Image (cartoon, grey):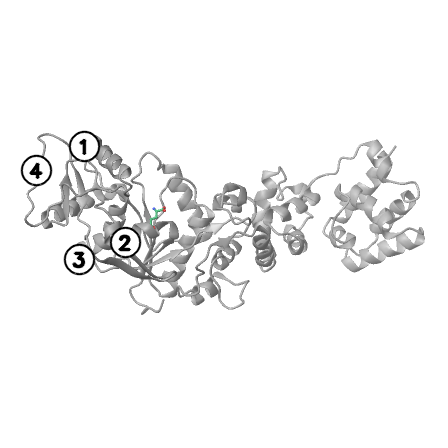
Amino acid sequence: MTETSCGVRTRFAPSPTGFLHIGGARTALYAWAFARHHQGTFILRIEDTDVERSSPEAVQAILDGMAWLGLPPDEGPFYQMRRMDRYREVIAQMLEAGTAYRCWCSREELDAMRAAQEAAGQKPRYDGRWRPEPGRTLPAPPVGAPSVVRFRNPKDGVVAWDDTVKGPIEFANAELDDLIIARSDGTPTYNFCVVVDDWDMAITHVIRGDDHVNNTPRQINILAALGATLPRYGHVPMIHGPDGQKLSKRHGAVSVMQYHAEGYLPEAVINYLARLGWSHGDEEIFSRAQFVSWFDGEHISRSPARFDFDKLRWLNNHHLKAMADADIAADVATRLAVRGANAGDAAHAGIDLAAVCGLLKDRSATLEEVTESAMMFYLVPHLHAAQLAEVIKPEVRPALAAFADLCADLDWTREAIAGAVKQTVAAHGLKMPQFGMPMRQLVFGRPQTPALEAVLVLMPRQTVIQRLRAGLAHAL
Ligand code: GLU
């Protein structure tokens, strides 16, 4: 899409019928980034006219998801339910102008119409019986009967647009019947509200999922009837699961806030979603700012993207590694608290959580994994006597006792600890794992940790000595 920078206006228009899922988030991201790229305006519009299915909780979930991802709208949120008067006004104008008309067909008549068409092997469609035509006399409207308002769709020709993602698309007008734009109770219908909003909000680029391709010819015809300038349309293919099926909860079509809960970083999710169905050369790992600078709407894939969980984890690890240790620690502290470990407690005063996070981030895909590993610094190991006896083999016991003694006078540095470990292992004729495993169990309550000296140095010296001695004393 080559555009002049000024005046680009995009929108994200979710229906608040559930959380913001990964597909919606990608649509929002593309619309946001395209506006940012052109120093334009990104608008959030809540399409809440389906009152049965919309809820305030879902609106909040969408706002939360966008805030977490860092996609703030420049305008809005606008709510369609608050714009009813405006839709009614446009309907009245269209009736006046003759681009829309009233139809008094009852449900029974429509059913009969459909049955007759199906019996004749035709596609069911409204037959235009209330459509005014030059020289045609319509029946008198039934007195007191309800009517709907239909759009007077052009009968001939085609409606065509050059889709910014899919290329030229064309529909024959003969395929489109006269859409109901207002129900008998006067409420406007979905496609009509979208049209009025895109028009009023002066949207220049509609970027949305390709499940809307079939709505576009109708929307274009109504916009044209209103004399509106048409936006450009770009329909982004769906996201499929790794198995090529429609993305479902099983695949990760969950709320973006679920990714937050699982310890993914917004920067990584943005990077992942950006790359899911779009490319910039071979670039895989990039920042939000880089994405914005590259995203001109070109190079969006025409075929469905496949969700790849391992890739998201891989990207998250990259973004995690790039994060400052103190920032990771600030987040992890909250997650530790959820697990009942308050890193700020006096009991943990000797533990530098930022340093712990610095050590663990390389080997963790998510903040939850960092937290899970960090717990070994905050949980007091509780091995009962029999377990201790199992862990502390007779041939290792003297080495553990000797190491505890050595620690008392040791420079508490990684190098010095590594030296002391080597010395102890050699002096007692042990192999490293024979010594390392019980050490880890006694001090950290788990058999596996990063390199022994790397974790020991982050634990206060007194805690290490005390845990070793307590373990040795309590073993059966
Ligand atoms: N409200 C529609 C949806 O959530 C989007 C409409 C549009 O982008 O035009 O699918």
Residue drawn 19% across and 50% down?
A: 153
Q: Position of residue 272 (x, y in %)?
A: 52, 56
**Callout 4 amino acid:** Pro
Circle 4 residue: 139
Counting other residues with Cα less than 10 Å from the Cα at mark 2, is it few (<14), some (14-19), or many (20 or more)?
A: many
Circle 1 residue: 106
* Closest to the observer, 202 or 92: 92
Q: Does label 2 or label 4 sit earlier along the sequence?
A: 4
**Callout 3 amino acid:** Gly
Q: Does label 2 or label 1 sit earlier along the sequence?
A: 1
Spatial separation of the CA atoms under disc 2 and disc 4: 30 Å
Circle 2 residue: 217
Q: Which mark is residue 227?
A: 3
**Callout 2 amino acid:** Pro
Instruction: For the residues labelled 2 and 4, say whether their Cβ atoms are less than 8 Å apart.
Output: no
Spatial separation of the CA atoms under disc 3 and disc 1: 31 Å
Helix, strand or loop at mark 1: loop
The image quadrant that residue 156 belongs to is bottom left
